[in-house]
Amino acid sequence: MKGGKNIFSSSEHLSTEQILNYLRHSLTRKEMHEVEKHLADCELCSDAIDGSKKLEADASLMKITSELQKMARKRKMVRRRIFSQIELISLFAVVFLILFLIVVVVVLFWKK
Ligand SMILES: [Zn+2]
Protein backbone atom coordinates (compact mmCIF):
# COMPACT_ATOMS: atom_id res chain seq x y z
CA MET A 1 0.00 0.00 0.00
CA LYS A 2 1.38 3.33 -1.05
CA GLY A 3 0.00 5.89 1.37
CA GLY A 4 -0.37 9.45 0.14
CA LYS A 5 0.28 8.59 -3.47
CA ASN A 6 -3.05 10.17 -4.36
CA ILE A 7 -1.74 13.72 -4.02
CA PHE A 8 1.14 12.96 -6.37
CA SER A 9 -1.08 11.15 -8.81
CA SER A 10 -0.35 13.22 -11.93
CA SER A 11 3.42 13.27 -11.45
CA GLU A 12 6.09 12.48 -8.92
CA HIS A 13 6.44 16.15 -8.14
CA LEU A 14 4.19 18.64 -6.42
CA SER A 15 1.67 20.48 -8.55
CA THR A 16 1.39 24.26 -8.52
CA GLU A 17 -1.91 23.87 -6.74
CA GLN A 18 -0.33 21.72 -4.05
CA ILE A 19 2.47 24.23 -3.60
CA LEU A 20 0.00 27.11 -3.30
CA ASN A 21 -2.21 25.16 -0.93
CA TYR A 22 0.86 24.26 1.10
CA LEU A 23 1.85 27.94 1.35
CA ARG A 24 -1.71 28.93 2.22
CA HIS A 25 -1.90 26.17 4.84
CA SER A 26 -5.04 24.87 3.19
CA LEU A 27 -3.87 21.26 2.99
CA THR A 28 -5.14 18.58 5.31
CA ARG A 29 -2.68 17.42 7.94
CA LYS A 30 -2.04 14.24 5.95
CA GLU A 31 -1.45 16.14 2.69
CA MET A 32 0.78 18.56 4.53
CA HIS A 33 2.82 15.65 5.83
CA GLU A 34 3.12 14.15 2.34
CA VAL A 35 4.21 17.48 0.87
CA GLU A 36 6.78 18.01 3.60
CA LYS A 37 8.04 14.48 3.13
CA HIS A 38 8.42 15.10 -0.60
CA LEU A 39 10.12 18.45 0.00
CA ALA A 40 12.62 16.81 2.33
CA ASP A 41 14.15 14.85 -0.54
CA CYS A 42 13.22 16.91 -3.57
CA GLU A 43 15.34 19.96 -4.23
CA LEU A 44 13.29 20.92 -7.27
CA CYS A 45 10.06 21.24 -5.32
CA SER A 46 11.82 22.95 -2.41
CA ASP A 47 13.07 25.57 -4.86
CA ALA A 48 9.57 25.87 -6.28
CA ILE A 49 8.21 26.39 -2.76
CA ASP A 50 10.86 29.03 -2.04
CA GLY A 51 10.09 30.81 -5.29
CA SER A 52 6.36 30.67 -4.70
CA LYS A 53 6.84 31.82 -1.13
CA LYS A 54 8.52 34.95 -2.43
CA LEU A 55 5.76 35.48 -4.98
CA GLU A 56 3.12 34.98 -2.30
CA ALA A 57 4.95 37.41 -0.04
CA ASP A 58 5.12 39.97 -2.84
CA ALA A 59 1.46 39.45 -3.62
CA SER A 60 0.39 39.84 0.00
CA LEU A 61 2.69 42.82 0.39
CA MET A 62 1.01 44.42 -2.59
CA LYS A 63 -2.35 43.59 -1.08
CA ILE A 64 -1.34 45.05 2.27
CA THR A 65 0.05 48.15 0.56
CA SER A 66 -3.16 48.71 -1.39
CA GLU A 67 -5.19 48.11 1.77
CA LEU A 68 -3.10 50.68 3.61
CA GLN A 69 -3.54 53.15 0.78
CA LYS A 70 -7.27 52.56 0.83
CA MET A 71 -7.35 53.04 4.61
CA ALA A 72 -5.21 56.18 4.38
CA ARG A 73 -7.51 57.58 1.73
CA LYS A 74 -10.55 56.81 3.85
CA ARG A 75 -8.92 58.32 6.95
CA LYS A 76 -8.01 61.46 5.00
CA MET A 77 -11.66 61.82 3.99
CA VAL A 78 -12.78 61.40 7.58
CA ARG A 79 -10.17 63.87 8.78
CA ARG A 80 -11.33 66.39 6.20
CA ARG A 81 -14.90 66.00 7.36
CA ILE A 82 -13.89 66.41 11.03
CA PHE A 83 -11.77 69.42 10.11
CA SER A 84 -14.67 71.17 8.41
CA GLN A 85 -16.82 70.37 11.45
CA ILE A 86 -14.21 71.92 13.72
CA GLU A 87 -14.08 74.93 11.41
CA LEU A 88 -17.84 75.28 11.64
CA ILE A 89 -17.73 74.99 15.45
CA SER A 90 -14.93 77.55 15.76
CA LEU A 91 -16.80 79.89 13.44
CA PHE A 92 -19.84 79.63 15.71
CA ALA A 93 -17.60 80.10 18.75
CA VAL A 94 -16.04 83.27 17.31
CA VAL A 95 -19.44 84.71 16.35
CA PHE A 96 -20.79 83.83 19.80
CA LEU A 97 -17.75 85.41 21.48
CA ILE A 98 -18.14 88.64 19.47
CA LEU A 99 -21.84 88.82 20.35
CA PHE A 100 -21.00 88.14 24.01
CA LEU A 101 -18.36 90.92 24.02
CA ILE A 102 -20.81 93.34 22.41
CA VAL A 103 -23.38 92.50 25.11
CA VAL A 104 -20.76 92.94 27.86
CA VAL A 105 -19.59 96.29 26.43
CA VAL A 106 -23.17 97.49 26.02
CA VAL A 107 -24.02 96.45 29.60
CA LEU A 108 -20.89 98.18 30.99
CA PHE A 109 -21.64 101.40 29.10
CA TRP A 110 -25.24 101.25 30.24
CA LYS A 111 -24.14 101.18 33.88
CA LYS A 112 -21.91 104.24 33.54
ZN1 LIG B 1 9.51 17.15 -6.39
Image (spheres, rainbow, N blue to C red):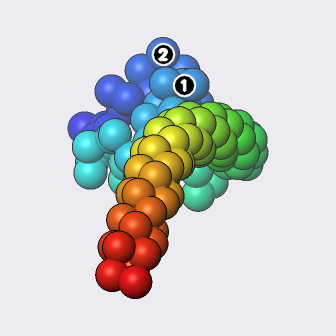
One can see residue 77 in this view = yes
Q: Foreground residue, 112 or 71? A: 112
Q: Which residue is mark 1?
A: 15
Against 54, residue 101 (above or below) is below
Q: Foreground residue, 44 or 55? A: 55
Q: What residue is rendered at 44% in x and 63% in y?
A: 102
Report if the CB atoms under discs 1 and 2 are less than 8 Å apart. Answer: yes
Tell me the crowding category of disc 2: few under 14, some 14 to 19, or many 20 or more residues within 10 angstroms, Cα based.
few
Q: What residue is rendered at 59% in x and 36% in y?
A: 73
Q: Foreground residue, 34 or 32? A: 32
Q: Foreground residue, 38 or 101? A: 101
SS at circle 1: loop
Residue type (three-letter) at the residue carrying disc 1: Ser
Against 70, residue 43 (above or below) is below
In the figure, is residue 42 to the left or right of 111? right
Tell me the crowding category of disc 1: few under 14, some 14 to 19, or many 20 or more residues within 10 angstroms, Cα based.
some
> Residue reaching furthest front?
112
Q: Position of residue 95 (x, y in %)?
A: 46, 52
Q: What residue is rendered at 62% in x and 54% in y?
A: 41
**Considering the image in quadrants, where does the N terminus appear?**
top left
Against 111, residue 36 (above or below) is above
Q: Position of residue 94 (x, y in %)?
A: 49, 58
The dot on residue 10 is 2
Single out the mark in the foreground, 1 or 2: 1
The dot on residue 29 is none
Where residue 96 sits, quadrant-wise, is bottom left
One can see residue 19 in this view = no
> Residue reaching furthest top?
10
Residue type (three-letter) at the residue carrying disc 2: Ser
> Residue reaching furthest bottom?
112
